[in-house]
Image (cartoon, grey):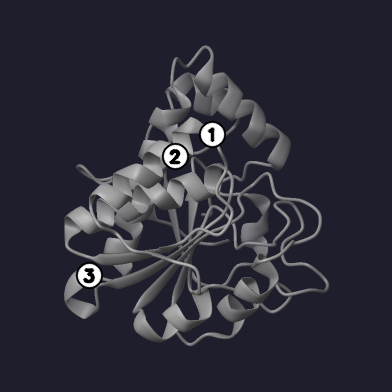
Amino acid sequence: MALRTLGAKAAAALDQELMSSGAFSLDQLMELAGLSVSQALFKLQPPSRGNRILIAVGPGNNGGDGLVAARHLWHYGYKPTVYYPKRPKNELYQRLTTQLQDLNVPFTSDFHSSLSQTDYIIDSIFGFSFSGEVREPFPSVISALATTKIPVLAVDAPSSWNIETGPPDQGPGKEYNPDALISLTAPKPLVKWFEGKHFVGGRFLTKDMAEKYQLDVPPYEGIDQVVEVPVR
């Protein structure tokens, strides 16, 4: 049986509750999310099968998850490259960027040329709070994600998809359906339209909080922060 989903408003409310009565900081949640992303990538693409990972990073929290994942992947023995064209001035993102620079993780300004030098892509551009029009420089990046033969892991949502209604009717994400998706905390309603491998990550919900938001906590094993689940 597929897990119950978490809509956009409920996801935002759950995040706020985790950071208030749950006593988590944003840094903690982002670290756990990014760790989950890195573990999902490891299951999909062990370093022995190709260790060059291109990470497309957006300007918000979804992008922060990608930055954290890049750091963990470097420590696992991968060679991550980060495409991060819109960098906010927020101190948290600046610290995450500095951590990567201290490891000599390369940043690229040309996503398209980097595609020819990668084995797997992580899409951490837009997450559950995305709505509206995709703005530059991301339309061409999402178009490339839709057409590339290189496998893609999307973080929480395929970028440009609506959390409730799935892929857009028009625009660069219309034909975009990545090879894999990691849903953070819980699947979102968009999984109805998703066709690839599906993971859930974010192993931090209490039983009471899961019951309050009517969520299923998947059967994580051992030290794993992710678990593969049915898409429907």
Whether tag 2 and tag 3 are in contact, CB under 8 A, the answer is no
State which quarter of the image contains the C terminus. Answer: bottom right
Q: Nearer the viewer, residue 70 or 127?
A: 70
Q: Amino acid at mark 1?
A: Asn
Furthest residue toward top: 21
**Dots 1, 2 in contact, CB < 8 A:** yes
* First of labels 2, 3 by sequence position: 3
Residue 67 rendering spot, x and y as whole percentages: 40, 50
Q: Looking at the image, can residue 202 be seen?
A: no
Vertical position of residue 78 compared to residue 215: above or below: below
Nearest to the observer: residue 220 or residue 41: 41
**Type of amino acid under label 3:** Pro
Q: Quadrant of residue 117?
A: bottom left
Question: Which residue carries the number 2 mark?
Answer: 94
User: Disc 3 or 1, which lies upstream in sequence?
Assistant: 3
Judge whether 220 appears above or below 151 on screen. above
Q: Label 3: state its secondary structure.
A: loop
Label 3, label 1: how far apart the Cα atoms are:
33 Å
The answer to whether 134 appears left or right of 73 in the picture is right
Q: Residue at x 18, y 53 (%)?
A: 75
Q: Amino acid at mark 2?
A: Gln
Q: 10 Å neighbourhood of mark 2: few (<14), some, or many (≥20)?
A: few
The picture places residue 46, in percent across and down from the top left corner, at 22, 70
Say which residue label 3 marks. Answer: 46
The correct choice, above or below, for 212 with respect to 62 in the image is above
Q: CA distance from mark 1 to mark 2?
A: 6 Å
**SS at mark 2 in the image:** helix
